[in-house]
Amino acid sequence: MSKMLKNPLSHIFLAYLKLVSKSGRFQLINGELIKDNTMVGYWHGDSYCMQLVLAEICKNNEKINVIVTSDRRGDIIEDMIKTKGARALRLPDGMNMRPFFRKLKEFAIEEEGVLAASLDGPLGPLHEPKKLIFLLAAEAKKPVAYIHFKYKRVMRLKKRWDKYVIPLPFCSITAVVEDLGIVDNDDLREFEHIKNKLIV
């Protein structure tokens, strides 16, 4: 594992997460909903604990791609998810976004496997979902699942916009997968209806 990691912070974050998973309790409910050709959304503040979900999904030999930011934080995330067998798709800034989105639509349609992204990332506002993962799902005619977490014994970074969750040793983490099914253009036009189905 160590040879795969480029950033020393990745070693620290992964080692700590291993301690948490060994001392605490992690449960994935409805994990069977995350299958091949599913789009998966989660809240940005749960990104660290999503590493545990990725590890569980990879046990089923699913191919996983995760959309992450292009900045230095994205370097660490890419490093970490590689150890779980997932691949990072780096989201560019500014003018490069439009051609990237075209390629991403083609990727979503043609590529087999799971495509995941934070719903309210990379910069928020908190728990305000963007349309990205739903647009891709509609283009590809693939189902959408989303994941929300229940925690006991965690620390939340309240000064961050996403209220980022850091699990503590001996914590309890439950990840619940919910099925939104196939999203079409009518759903996108009535996006408030989708928002109302998302559990925080």
Image (cartoon, grey):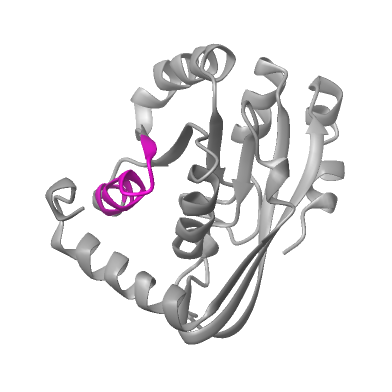
Position of residue 138 measured from the top left corner of the image (x, y, whole percent): 72, 21
Residue lying at 82% horizontally and 28% vertically, measured from the top left:
189
Q: Is residue 17 visible?
A: yes
* Quarter containing the C terminus: bottom right
**Image x and y of residue 12, in percent:** 23, 70
Q: Is residue 75 located in the magenta-colored stretch of the structure?
A: yes
Residue 18 as seen in the image, left or right of residue 155? left
Q: Which residues are magenta?
A: 74-88
Residue 152: in magenta span:
no
Q: Residue at x 47, y 52 (%)?
A: 55
Which residue is depicted at the point 54% across and 84% down?
A: 171
Decide which of 50, 187 is in the foreground and name it: 50
As drawn, is 56 to the left or to the right of 134?
left
- Note whether 119 is above or below 114 in the view shown: below
Q: Residue 41 appears at what percent x and percent y?
A: 62, 45
**For residue 118, above or below residue 115:** below
The quarter of the picture where residue 135 lies is: top right
Instruction: From the top left corner, tell me how far across and down residue 100 is, in percent.
Output: 41, 21
Quadrant for residue 19, please give it.
Answer: bottom left
* 167 on left or right of 173: left
Identified at 15% across, 55% down, the residue is: 2
Our reading of the magenta stretch's main secondary structure is helix
Location of residue 117 with respect to 161 vertically, above or below:
above
